[in-house]
């Protein structure tokens, strides 16, 4: 990797950790902050994730593990509440790079895409509907709500991406490094037991 791409990765990692930005926007902001042309070669997500882990180990080693655990425990609570929809945790909380600025991302696998919304309404929960890229190239619904994290004593964003039940096939396929992009409640409990 060339030095400019490494510098973009390091700057984007700082932005991800300190501001809670997702990878794509963090890379674009890093390019802008570094005064590079918009067409600069961007680091891949694996490279950026490595830079995030490095940043966390240097600057956040005393706080990040506790914050990550609190977010994972909160995710487990919501996965239990939404068990009917076969929830899978994804994003920074699953991958281990989350801090208190990170949102929790759950993927719900539903036979009826409106059933998750109905359950939230039945529980009296307010949420916003938006869209997110789906596994088949189109957009899918994303329900976003704010939930309280007692362990961190602050509100946390919870995003529920609604996927078709058939999308669960292949959802746990590992990447080139042998890591999965998401995990079910049993896998999350194993992570919690290991830390």
Image (tube, rainbow, N blue to C red):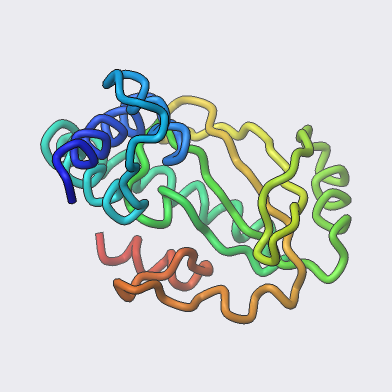
Number of numbered discs overlaid on the protein picture: 0
- Left or right of 179, for residue 14: left
Could you tell me residue 195's position as x and y percent?
A: 25, 59
Could you tell me residue 179's position as x and y percent?
A: 35, 70
- In the rendered image, the vertical position of residue 107 relative to residue 23, given as above or below: below
Could you tell me residue 75's position as x and y percent?
A: 52, 51
Residue, x 80% and y 46% (percent of image)?
Answer: 120
Residue, x 20% and y 36% (percent of image)?
Answer: 4
Quarter of the view holding residue 2 = top left
For this rendering, which residue is in front, 53 or 101? 53
For this rendering, which residue is in front, 43 or 172? 43
For this rendering, which residue is in front, 5 or 105? 5
- In the rendered image, the vertical position of residue 152 relative to residue 79, given as above or below: above
Residue, x 41% and y 76% (percent of image)?
Answer: 174
Q: Residue furthest left?
A: 58
Could you tell me residue 107's position as x and y percent?
A: 63, 59
- Left or right of 62, for residue 117: right
- Left or right of 15, for residue 106: right
Quarter of the view holding residue 138 = bottom right
Residue, x 42% and y 70% (percent of image)?
Answer: 180
- In the rendered image, the vertical position of residue 22 relative to residue 69, given as above or below: above
Quarter of the view holding residue 100 = top left
Q: Residue furthest bottom?
A: 169
């Amino acid at each position: 990797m060339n030095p400019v791409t490494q510098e973009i990765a390091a700057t984007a990692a700082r932005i991800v950790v300190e501001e809670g930005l997702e990878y794509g926007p963090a890379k674009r902001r890093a390019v802008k902050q570094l005064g590079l042309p918009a067409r600069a070669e961007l680091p891949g997500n694996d490279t950026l994730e490595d830079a995030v882990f490095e940043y966390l180990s240097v600057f956040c080693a005393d706080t990040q593990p506790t914050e990550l655990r609190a977010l994972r425990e909160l995710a487990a609570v919501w996965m239990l509440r939404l068990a009917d929809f076969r929830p899978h945790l994804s994003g920074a909380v699953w991958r281990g790079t989350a801090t208190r600025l990170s949102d929790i991302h759950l993927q719900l696998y539903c036979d009826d895409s409106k059933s998750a919304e109905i359950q939230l309404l039945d529980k009296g929960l307010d949420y916003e509907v938006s869209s997110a890229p789906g596994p088949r190239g189109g957009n899918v619904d994303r329900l976003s709500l704010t939930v309280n994290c007692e362990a961190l004593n602050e509100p946390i964003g919870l995003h529920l991406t609604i996927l078709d039940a058939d999308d669960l096939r292949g959802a746990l396929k590992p990447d080139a490094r042998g890591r999965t992009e998401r995990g079910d409640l049993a896998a999350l409990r194993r992570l919690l037991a290991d830390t």
